[in-house]
Image (spheres, rainbow, N blue to C red):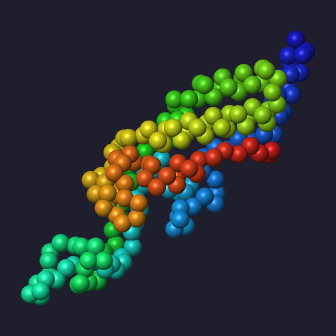
Amino acid sequence: MRKVTGFLDKVAKQLQSTELKVGFMAGATYPDGTSVPMVAAIQEYGGTIKVPERTQDIHFRMNKKGEVGHRFVKKKVANFVQTVTVPAHSVKIPSRPFFRNAIAQNKARWQQTMVKGLLAGKSVTHVMEVLGAEIQGDVVESIATLTEPPLSATTLRNRRNRRVRPNKSDKPLVDTRVMINSVTYRVDKK
């Protein structure tokens, strides 16, 4: 009995002094400098993004008669440009709980991984490293497979028609792959 109690006390102390963090670490950014943890939090819980007023050039094609078409064209084929002011507006992002889904679907298995590792005599740090990699994979899987709520028609159209990296995917969280590739884990001593 003393061996068991001693083992449990030792493991408890090691667990109290070890911390596993899984998710999006500070410093992870999109190419434009936007914080990945901030975007992930908005996607997880939903939110409203306020877009400030801005100016934008829109491109048209003028025919030989001097008539301007009513359809926007790509900059390279345009011969008429108009600068417009896009008013400030808000964009509502619905909750897409990829992290909470991963926890709900996998927490029992994560507990089993931890118990099996500790009972096998592995160090707490080793068990946490294995567990971190497992949780990281499950969060990535949750992001990759999430389909609800669906993207808006506007978002889908913008994705397909943009000049840089057009994308026909209708999955909400995998467009640029920056967020999914930023999921990581870290084991620290407290």
Is 23 situated left or right of 32 in this image? right
Is 38 situated left or right of 110 in this image? left
Q: Residue at x 85, y 26 (%)?
A: 9
Q: Position of residue 28 (x, y in %)?
A: 60, 58
Q: Quadrant of residue 17?
A: top right
Q: Residue at x 13, y 83 (%)?
A: 63
- All told, the count of numbered labels is 0
Q: Quadrant of residue 69?
A: bottom left
Is 136 situated left or right of 68 in this image? right
Q: Can you say whether 165 is above or below 137 in the image?
A: below
Q: Residue at x 16, y 83 (%)?
A: 62
Q: Can you say whether 58 is above or below 8 in the image?
A: below
Q: Position of residue 123 (x, y in %)?
A: 82, 31
Q: Can you say whether 155 is above or below 50 in the image?
A: above
Please indicate, yes or no, whether residue 85 appears anywhere in the rendered image.
no
Task: For the C terminus, give its image quadrant.
Answer: top right
Q: Quadrant of residue 96?
A: top left
Q: Can you say whether 163 is above or below 109 in the image?
A: below
Residue placed furthest toward the top: 1
* Foreground of the two, 163 or 182: 163
Q: Residue at x 22, y 73 (%)?
A: 72
Is 19 situated left or right of 39 in this image? right
Q: Position of residue 42 (x, y in %)?
A: 47, 53
Please indicate, yes or no, whether residue 96 appears anywhere in the rendered image.
yes
Task: For the N terminus, give its image quadrant.
Answer: top right
Residue placed furthest toward the left: 65
Q: Position of residue 2 (x, y in %)?
A: 91, 15
